[in-house]
Amino acid sequence: MGEYHPPPLPSPFNNTSPPPTLLTQGAEAHLYKTTSLDPSIPAALKIRPSKPYRHPTLDRRLTRQRIIQEARCLAKLVREGVSVPALLAIDWAGHGGEEGGWGGAWLMMEWIEGSVVRVVLEKWEAWMKDQTLDAASVEKEEKRVRGLLRQMGAAIGVLHKAGVVHGDLTTSNLMLRPFGTEVVEDDGNPSMEGDVVLIDFGLASQSSQDEDRAVDLYVLERAIGSTHPRSEPMFEELILGYRNSYKGAVSALKRLEDVRMRGRKRSMLG
Amino acid sequence: MASCLETINLPHLPSSLPVHVALYRDVQNAASLKGHLLAGQKEFEYAFIDASMVLSRAHVTAAVFRAVNDYMHNRLQSHNVHSEIVFSLNPTNNIAESFRRFGITDSTKDLLVIKVSVSPEITHESVAAHLSSSVQGTPVPFDDQTLSEVSDINKIKKAYKLGALPSPSSPNDEAKQRLEKSLLSAIALRGS
Amino acid sequence: MIAIGMEGSANKLGIGIMLHPKDGSPPQVLANIRHTYVSPPGEGFLPKDTARHHRSWVVKLVKQALKEAKVSVDDVDCICFTKGPGMGAPLQSVVVAARMLSLLWGKELVGVNHCVGHIEMGRLITGATNPVVLYVSGGNTQVIAYSSQRYRIFGETLDMAVGNCLDRFARTLHISNDPAPGYNIEQLAKQGTQLVDLPYVVKGMDCSFSGILAAIDGLAKHWGLGGEEKAREDIMQTADVKAAVDSSDSTPTRADLCFSLQETVFSMLVEITERAMAHVGSKQVLIVGGVGSNERLQEMMGIMARDRGGSVYATDERFCIDNGIMIAQAGMLAYGTGFRTPLSESTCTQRFRTDEVFVKWRD
């Protein structure tokens, strides 16, 4: 059982100097930070290596299909003016033409500054734990979080309005990009000023169905419930932000009630 | 005529493949340049692009990157990497159409010229010398400021079927960024 | 401590006897026997017939197990039985037998969740400490990971179980159900070379098989590969005929369909397992359940685990396929924490989720 080594970078990124830095390795993809085609502007590079466990034909089909689907969603959302990382370049063919070659695929995206909402909320919850605040200050603090949640709801609404569902909404897939470039110094209590940007469209698809939209919200609701207990009671604020963001929100939210009732729990037959 | 030829090492591409770019205004001999190109004269193997169809540096470099990456991996769909650059600007797979839209025409006044060092004898000097003897026009810097004076936003939007997008009103406003990002993704996704 | 385990949630009737030595040394399997109800080719097993099978064999098997284990009734501490999930009638016939033995011998009852039985037996046999578990059988398809006293379901099938999908395709092809339809599909798949396109349905950590079954049934029909006639050709075909068939790659063969079905559904299973491993940060994966004895699935899972710097744990058919010893093992763990099932509550249930069990015996 050796240590894990990420696979070598595909061409042309074996030429990149300095080499891209590995940030995260999920089940499907590895995320790197590198530069865009302008060396002064950073970019995110997502690599989907080929999966040697599956049949090469199936592997190519899936890798290609998924990276193109992700890229198409990003392209569509950028055109619609939704806050997502822009698609900069992509290679879905692996190199060396139809057969043979490397078999993986990559996608280069705009780099988004800021932190993921998970980190913002975790910092805030940790900070709150250490404080002894009077009722007025608690209210003021919670008001900030409510504002953030409302913005998150609005961002998701705009996404849904554009005809895309995310497929994997968690607080790790929502970023808070600070306005301007100045770094706000915090005393452990994070700033909640900024734009909410949606990231990681690896499981996204084009859909305008209430069911898919409701499942997006439900998945996020559950994720917030399990990772941010202190913020969970304020989830209603997210719903509020969502409700006011586009026309179809009302029927998607009605569907959310059903999805909640049904839950993910399914009785298994033996 | 003073040379304004810029040589760029695009990030991620091998340093052995630098890209030479020159932008000219008030070009007088577009028809003859196009003739040399169509005659297949080796020394006129350039990407000759009608600069009115170019929004920004990022727009051009995206097309160059795509073409050179396809070149490196033996996936060219046109004759050579230079024709592939023109083709790469196109949002669809129609090569002839890409030349009609983005390539040099007899009436081209603003011309963007690109040459990739695909062989060792192609150097900054050799390209600069050849261009200054063959292009009759005013060399200008290849930058977003200059391009913003040259580009025909409506024609660009039409070519990419992006008519619904707001038009930029200043060289770096939000509308320009959104349009640029939309162009980059169209270039990236061609043929998907 | 000695426990008898009684399992009969599907077409296997299993009786196992497990010893947990008082000195804390490793548990010992004293007996693990099984009798399978095999239905004719082209047919599945019906609850009524399966229950009848279990009723007529259960006494014989218990007697034989005690004899093999060389223990007397007095040595036995408790009787563990499968409470569910499973098919109603077969479950019921075994729980009645368990109750009878409990009353007859004056032994306490322990009702066991079938899935937890698989997991605990897998952990015991392989030594995997805290693996992500892929539980794949004719009735279940789940990706499970342990967290604070529960085996939590991270992903599962949205419709039919993967084993059911394979079994039903075996019926389409009229493949023998002896020893198991999945086993015979696996053998036939080894001769397949051509991958046909099938739907591939993964949603996050969940997956779906019904569309795949419909598609491959359709292909079998289209190419005229289903039914009894064609099944006979499998047996008739000699090696060189097969080679000749393989070299042409226009028309898929029966073997190609089995191969394609396995490649597709197993890829889905490995994918959702990998996602769960990444999610919980585990490098171990344990495969349990009848489909887990498929060597191609084990191989694929092994490659995935290796690429993540981890390893795969699997058991052979004695412990993978439904058996009595796993019920004894999980029952004994619960029994050790004081868990008992009073006679009045010794019922069975077709629906019993893995995450309903309070796992008191783990930290």
Image (spheres, coloured by chain):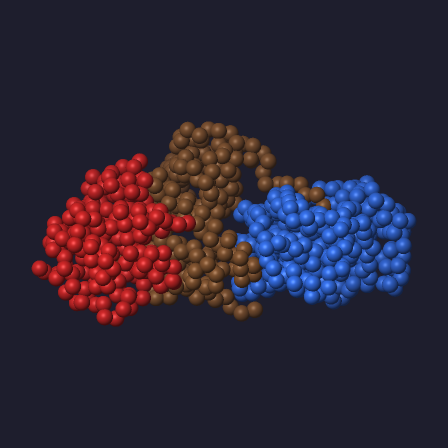
Q: Which chain is blue?
A: C
Q: Where is residue A169 drawn, in percent x and y?
A: 47, 44
Chain identity for the colour red used in the image: B
Q: Which residue is drawn at 22% across and 54% down?
A: B48
Quadrant in which the N terminus of chain C appears: bottom right
Residue C101 spot, x, y in % from top left: 88, 50
Q: Residue at x 56, y 61 (%)?
A: A53
Q: Which residue lies furthest to the front in this view?
A: B39
| A67 or A25, nearer to the observer | A67
Colour assigned to chain A in the rendering is brown
Q: Name the quadrant containing residue B177.
A: top left
Say if C352 sits above or below C314 in the image. above
Q: In this view, does B116 lie to the left or right of C132?
A: left
The residue closer to the viewer here, C312 or C257, is: C257
Image coordinates of residue B189 in percent, x first then y, are: 38, 49
Residue name at image x 28 percent, y 58 percent: B82
Quarter of the image for the C terminus of chain C: give it: bottom right
Note whether residue C133 is visible.
Answer: no
